Amino acid sequence: MTIGIPKEIMHGEARVSATPETVAKFVKDGFRVLLERGAGVGALYSDEEYAKSGAELIDGPREVYERSEIILKVKEPQMNHALATHEVDLMHSGQYLITFIHPASPVNHEMVRRLAERGVIGLTLDGVPRISRAQNLDALTSMSTCAGYKGILMAANDLASFIPMMGTAVGMIPPAKALVIGVGVAGLQALATAKRLGAVTYAADIRPAAVEQAQSLGAKIVELGVPAELAVAEGGYAATLPEHILEGERQRLAEVIKDMDIVFCSALIPGKIAPILITEEMVKQMKPGSVIVDISIDQGGNCAITPAGERKVIHNVVLEGIKNIPGMLPKSSTWMFANNMYNLVKYLVKDGSVHLDMSDEICAKILVTRDGQIVHAGTLEAMGR
């Protein structure tokens, strides 16, 4: 089979879906690898390194898409302004696309419909279940580690004050307060990073196990008042809550958020739109100069007014809605991502072709489009079907 590695075109995206190391492993396994020239430059991998590993270098994306049976990407298909063509329109029927599609997010619905119409078989990395046998395929966990670390560094850069307590000749400056909402992989990394920087850390999560982990990192817990039997879904993920329970959560968070300097949002429900936990009114009550880093923005965001893909100051609060935070650590994130992709392709390809066994939880959870149809449950729910 032929694997295509196009250059990422999202603004500021420096990652790439394969390293010279994983290309060499693909070639050894019998795959042909087509790589668009310059695809790895942002992650500090040269074309020469890829060529030595066995990749065929291609001058532009059209040929990569035309000749490939499997496309490996980092981000969901975008409009390629240089070609005046959407990346979906470069794909063909029967082609496999493996990337972060984030299909439940409303901003991606039209793109998902187009994937189905073109007969592309879309497989989304944010659907990989967090089960033991899927750990080495789980790019979401890998990228969440990067986002948790870098997201707090972004907040530190945005703040107009120190994070640690500072004793000075003219008096004591108190430490910053940082609240992490959603203590999964990214949230735990954010807590650890904020604590290392000297912040007083707080954590909020509806899952008892997540609360325990946050406490182990020294965080003060914000009680959300959600019964455990409502909070936890299959696999230990956060469950979808009814609106009246979410409203109770928002009221409890509102009392705490107004005193925070940093709020890191990473509350997600796999394959579904992120719950809105911070309203515009809550943002208005925050301290001037405080920062919200909303890494759940790919699935809609936890804050109602997070600007998708942008950094803005709204109501004197810095709102970070950047969508490719792991891309700000391109070397480390690419190395992790590329190995996840290699392991996933190896898992799916048997005897020279892709096998999607729908009785397998991994295949069932990552499949978005097939046979001209949208089949992803969370996406259909978000579309109101």
Image (cartoon, rainbow, N blue to C red):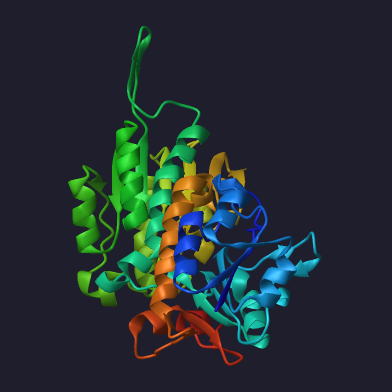
Q: Percent x, y for residue 5?
A: 60, 65
Q: Is residue 209 left or right of residue 8?
A: left
Q: Residue at x 52, y 35 (%)?
A: 158
Q: Is residue 327 left or right of residue 258?
A: right
Q: Residue 282, can we see it?
A: no
Instruction: Name the residue: 29% across, 45% down.
Output: 202
As displayed, is residue 309 above or below residue 152? below
Q: How many marks?
A: 0
Of the 4 image quadrants, the one containing the C terminus is bottom right
Residue 130's x, y, as percent? Answer: 31, 69
Q: Tell me the quarter of the image containing the N terminus.
A: bottom right
Quadrant of the image occupied by residue 96: bottom right
Of the pair 119 and 354, the residue shown nearer to us? 354
78 or 223, nearer to the observer: 78
- Can residue 9 be seen from the camera position used here? yes
Q: Residue at x 40, y 44 (%)?
A: 149
Q: Nearer the viewer, residue 230 or 11?
A: 11
Residue 188: image location, x then y, percent: 30, 50
Residue furthest out toward the top: 169
Q: Against 36, is 358 above or below?
A: below
- The correct choice, above or below, for 141 with respect to 153 in the image is below
Q: Write the residue at 35% across / 37% down.
A: 177
- Specify the quadrant of the image occupied by residue 172: top left
Where does residue 285 sit, x and y in percent of width and height?
A: 48, 44
